[in-house]
Amino acid sequence: MKNPKILLIIVILSLFVIVTLQNTEIARFKILFWTVDMSRIIFIYLSVIVGFITGYIVAKITGGKSLKIEVSDEKKKE
């Protein structure tokens, strides 16, 4: 394989399939006042999607600026 992108895609897809096959059993999740029975893999993927959406919204609201810590001149001299 000459193209490293293709190799990376194959590795990522392989890991995706392995994780999916290992987490197919039904599990009970208690979320606040609700009890939900669903496949573990669905819960994992929903959590990832909600995390990405939350990160995207926070980045849009803050303008994509990262938090910067400023160091005072006194600490720079030390």
Image (cartoon, grey):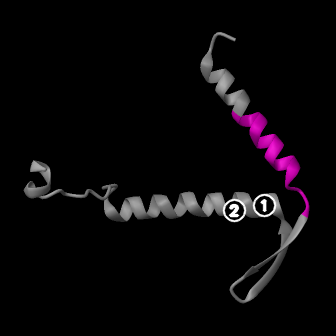
Q: Pointer 1: what residue? A: 42
| Highlighted magenta segment, given as a residue range | 12-25
Q: Eyeballing the image, is 33 above or below 61?
A: below
Crowd class of label 1 (few under 14; some 14 to 19; many from 20; radius 10 Å): some
Foreground residue among 59 and 23: 23
Q: Is 49 a magenta residue?
A: no
- Secondary structure found at label 1: helix
Left or right side of 51 for 41: right
On the image, numbered disc 2 is attached to which residue? 46
Q: Residue at (60%, 64%) from the top-left corner? A: 50
Marks 2 & 1, CB-CB < 8 Å contact: yes
The residue positioned 72% from the left and 89% from the top of the image is: 33
Q: Residue 28 location, x and y as percent?
A: 85, 75
- Type of amino acid at the residue the image marks with label 1: Ile
Which residue is most to the top?
2
Q: Within the image, what quadrant is residue 7 found in?
A: top right
Occupied quadrant, residue 35: bottom right
Name the residue at 55% across, 57% down.
Answer: 52
Crowd tier of the residue under label 2, counting other residues whose Cα lies within 10 Å: few below 14, some 14–19, many 20 or above: few
Magenta-colored segment: predominant secondary structure: helix
Residue 4 image offset from top left, x and y in percent? 61, 19
Residue 78 at x, y percent in the picture: 13, 50
Residue 63 point in image, percent of width and height: 31, 58
